[in-house]
Image: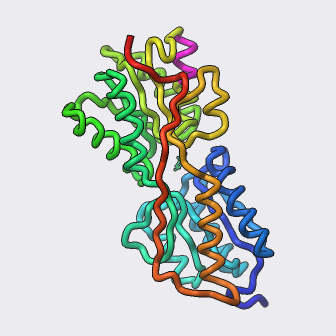
């Protein structure tokens, strides 16, 4: 029977195994764990708090070294349960405010501001935000940042029309693109909460003969590898996903195992950067 802190397995519980962002994140965590003689067990909550809770009991039963988690459950219940079960954890990809435990994330408010400032500076005044599940902090922060850029430019919030989706994936992006095309007053620029949504929007616009960026500018978020490889290379707010994974694993390793030190709740926030490519430019 393994004692706490003895396991050589670290679990990584991601929101969406189909999103290359989490593959890049896992790459960083896996390398850091391997260098410390540990392995990483990658699990997928598929954005479901119920699935997340199932994994919680498995992690407790298997006495994993600890868990890196991008929470699907916005209430913090999962993290409280981790603490109850004595499972060390690090929150990844979400700025954990007052929650105990460590976290590492990118400043998504700054990221949203970078995206919208780029479009407003290019001259766009009729803009749309294709968002994701409203309970995800990543989505909320990107929206908040986008509105900060509008306010900076003295533009009313009504200049940013929001199209909500329930999943941050390509299919939801295709659906949002179709809704965009149906709008009476079609925006000239669209900011998407992540690159998978943006690639789906691009597919719908392309199928309808709407040219990007000539008829509509498009900006994504994450800068996954497919962003630069898209038919129209995507302008995107880059998240250093692999670095997020590496730092998260190091935080967990420092907190567990033979030389454990309590971090007193270290919250690391990295800066995003805007990568401008062919999918965005000024309105014609
Ligand atoms: O899947 C959730 C999204 O949040 C990812 O695309 C990435 O942007 C993360 O921050």
Residue at x 32%, y 21% (from the top left corner): 123
Q: How is the image coloured?
A: rainbow
The one of 271 and 49 positioned closer to us in this rendering: 271
Tell me the magenta residue range. Answer: 202-208
The number of numbered discs placed on residues in the rendered structure image is 0
Q: Quadrant of residue 34?
A: bottom right
Residue at x 44%, y 20% (from the top left corner): 281
The one of 146 and 134 positioned closer to us in this rendering: 146
Q: Quadrant of residue 202?
A: top right
The one of 242 and 74 positioned closer to us in this rendering: 242
263 within the magenta span: no
The location of residue 4, given as percent across then percent down, is 68, 88
The location of residue 200, given as percent across then percent down, is 56, 28
**Quadrant in which the N terminus is drawn:** bottom right
Residue at x 51%, y 17% (from the top left corner): 212
The location of residue 284, given as percent across then percent down, is 38, 10
**Magenta span dominant secondary structure:** helix
The one of 185 and 270 positioned closer to us in this rendering: 270
């Amino acid at each position: 029977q393994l004692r706490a802190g003895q396991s050589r397995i670290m679990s990584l519980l991601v929101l969406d195994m189909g999103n290359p962002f989490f593959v890049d994140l896992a790459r960083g965590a896996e390398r850091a764990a391997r260098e410390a003689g540990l392995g990483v067990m990658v699990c997928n909550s598929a954005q479901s708090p119920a699935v997340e809770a199932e994994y919680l009991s498995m992690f407790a039963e298997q006495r994993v070294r600890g868990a890196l988690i991008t929470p699907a459950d916005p209430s913090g219940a999962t993290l409280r349960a981790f603490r109850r079960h004595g499972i060390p954890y690090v929150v990844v990809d979400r700025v954990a405010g007052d929650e105990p435990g460590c976290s590492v994330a990118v400043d998504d408010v700054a990221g949203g501001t970078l995206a919208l400032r780029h479009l407003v500076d290019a001259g766009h005044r009729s803009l749309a935000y294709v968002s994701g599940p409203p309970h995800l902090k990543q989505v909320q922060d990107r929206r908040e940042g986008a509105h900060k850029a509008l306010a900076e430019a003295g533009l009313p919030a009504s200049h940013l029309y929001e199209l909500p989706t329930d999943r941050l994936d390509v299919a939801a992006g295709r659906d949002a693109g179709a809704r965009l095309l149906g709008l009476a007053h079609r925006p000239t620029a669209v900011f998407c909460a992540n690159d998978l949504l943006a690639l789906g929007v691009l597919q719908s616009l392309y199928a309808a003969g709407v040219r990007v960026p000539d008829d509509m500018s498009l900006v994504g978020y994450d800068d996954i590898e497919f962003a630069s490889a898209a038919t129209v290379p995507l302008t995107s707010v880059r998240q250093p996903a692999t670095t997020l994974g590496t730092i998260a694993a190091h935080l967990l390793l420092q907190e567990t195992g033979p030389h454990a030190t309590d971090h007193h709740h270290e919250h690391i926030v990295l800066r995003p950067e805007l990568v401008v490519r062919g999918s965005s430019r000024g309105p014609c």
